[in-house]
Amino acid sequence: MQDSPDSSHGFRVGQRVHSSGDSRRIGTVKYVGPVEGYSGTWVGVDWDNGEGKHDGSVNGVQYFHAKSERSGSLVRAPNLSQGISLLEALEKRYRSKSTNDEEDEMYVLSTSNNRVSVQLVGKDKIQDKLSRFEELTNASLAYMGVSFPGIPDQINTTVPNMKELDLTGNLLSDWKDVGKICGQLPALQALNLSNNLMSPYKSELPPLESIRILVLNNTGVDWEQVELLRQSLTAIEELHLIGNNISRVLPMSSSFVQGFNSLRLLNLDDNCIAEWDEVMKLSQLRCLEQLYLNKNCLNSILYPDNGQQNELEATSYWPFQNLRCLLLGDNNIGDLVSVDSLNLFPNLVETRLSENPIADTTSGGVPRFVLIARLAKIKVFNGSEVTPRERKDSEIRYVRLVISRLHANAEEIKQHPRFSELKSLYGIEDERPSTGASGPQTIGSGFLSITLKCVGASMGEKQPLTKKLPATTTVGKLKFLCESFFKLKSLKLKLFLQEEGSPLPVLLDNDTSSLLDLGIGNESFILVAKKVDRKIRN
C-alpha cells in the first residue's frame, strides 16, 4: 500500500471506504465504472451495516454482488472517503479544537425536557496533556477513518511511548499496514483492530514482540490466519476473536494448537464452534487460564478419560491443566453428563452455563442449586460468587431431591455421581420414618423453617411470615396455607423460590410436588404472588 491513497487514480475494488461526513458508515468497494443511463464514473459499495438500496443491480443490470438484497449502493466518488493516515487521525483526535457542533452536543435534559449545556471542568488542562504526543501512552482512534500508517518512521518519533492503541472501526485491511504501525511503536502492548475487515494473508508478519493483548473481534479472521499470527506474537497473553464465524480450529502442524506459550486468555465468543473435538485442540495451551466460548453451537462437554489422555501428544501434560475459567453460556448444552465433566478439569473454579437448555427450568432444565451441587469445585457460577453458605444449602437440597426420587426409582442413583459423597458429608438419613418412630429424624420427618413474602402491589402491604412446615407439604397445600396466613381468599396464587445467587426466582408450578421433592431446605425464602390469567383476545 502507498503511504497515501492517490485520489487521482480513483477507487479500487476491494478498498475499504466510509461515507463522507460519517466515518461509522463503512463499506467495501465492489465496482468502479459507468452505470447505464447515467454519466460519469460510479463506485459500487457493499455497506457493512446492510443499509444500502439494492443487491448490486440497477434496472436489470448486475454491476456487483452485494452480501444481501439491500446492502449495496452506487455512489458518486465525492460522497466517499478513502480515509486518512494514523498520524492525521492523532492530530484530529487530540490536537484539534472542539467545533461548535461538538460543543452543542454536550448537554443534559432538565425535568422539563429542555437542554442544559454542560461545561467540562478542566477540559483545557486535559486537552493540553493529551496534545503532548511524546507523553501519550493510550490513544483511542475508533471510527476515525484510518486507512494507512503515514510517513515512514514518523509514527515512532511522534508517539514514542504509545502502549495502548484502539483502532476499532477504521478502514485498515492489509496486515502489512498493521505490521508497519506496530513496528514503529516498540512500546505498544495492547492493540484493538475490531471491526476492521482484514484481508487474508499468506506470508508471515514481522515479529510483534511487545504485543501482549490483541483484539480482532469482527475482523473476518479465521484460524488459519491465527496460526500465521502465532509466529509473530511471541509474547501474546490475551487474544480476542469474537464474531469471526470460526467453526474449526486448524493447527498448522499437529493435532493440537502449539506455541502461544504466554497466552492466558482466549476469547472465542459468538462464533460457530459446534464440536467439542475442536475445543480439545486447544487443550495443550499450557498457560491458558481463561477460555470464553459463549454464543457458539456446542451440544456437549467431554473431558478425556485416561484412555483418551494416552493418545495426547504431550505425555506429561493434562488437558487444560491451568484452565481456571470456562464460559459456555448461550450454547446448546442439555445433558448433566456434560455438567459433571467439568469436575474433571484440574483447576477449573469458574464457569457459565446460563442460556443453555440444561439451565432453563422452564423447558426441562435444572435449577441453580442442582448445578452448584454437581459442580464440586466451582466458586463463581454464571457470573456470581458461590458463597460457602450457598454451596452448603445447595448440596443439602440436592441430596434431599435425589432421595425423594430414589424411592420411586432406585436406578436413578447412577445419574448422581456426587450423591453418596454429599449424603455422607452432611449425615443425611434416607429412609422415611414409620409412625411413632424414635431415634434420629430422617429427611422425610423434619420440619422446615420457611419465610413467606408477598410481592406485587395487588397483594397490599403485608409483613413476611416465617413458618415451620413439614417437609412433605406440597406446593398446592402451601398455596392454600398462604391464603389463610395472608388473608388472600379471593386471589389465585403462584409461588416462587428465591435462591441465593440466582438473578430470578424459580416458579414452583407443580402443585403435587412437596418441599422435600423440590429439595427446598431450611430457612428458604418463598415469594407469594398473584396469578394473572391471560385471556386470549379475538
Image: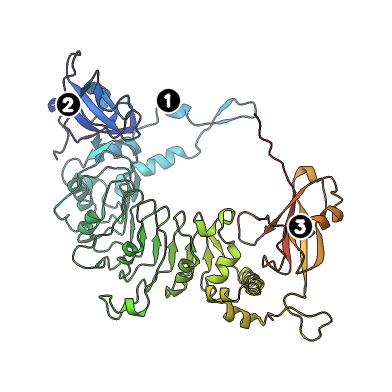
Is residue 486 shown above or below 370? above
Q: Position of residue 329 (x, y in %)?
A: 47, 56
Q: Position of residue 194 (x, y in %)?
A: 33, 46
Is residue 379 shown above or below 423? above
| Residue that badge 1 annotates | 100
Identify the amino acid type marked 2: Val
Q: Nearer the viewer, mark 3 or mark 2?
A: 3
Q: CA distance from mark 1 to mark 2?
A: 37 Å
Q: Nearer the viewer, mark 1 or mark 2?
A: 2
Residue 279 appears in the rendering: yes
Q: CA distance from mark 1 to mark 3?
A: 67 Å
Q: Residues within 10 Å of mark 3 (few under 14, many from 20)?
A: some
Q: CA distance from mark 3 to mark 2?
A: 72 Å
Identify the amino acid type marked 3: Gly
Element class at badge 1? helix
- Earlier residue among tags 3 and 2: 2
Q: Nearer the viewer, mark 1 or mark 3?
A: 3
At a point 79% along the width and 59% down the height, the residue shown is 477
Counting every numbered tag in the picture gives 3
Q: Which corner quadrant of the image does residue 34 belong to? A: top left
- Earlier residue among tags 1 and 3: 1
| Residue that badge 2 annotates | 32
| Residue that badge 3 annotates | 476
Q: Position of residue 62 (x, y in %)?
A: 21, 25
At a point 31% along the width and 59% down the height, the residue shown is 212
Contact (Cβ within 8 Å) of mark 1 with mark 2: no
Report the side of 423 relative to 442 (left or right): left
Report the side of 208 relative to 280 (left or right): left
Report the side of 530 relative to 175 (left or right): right
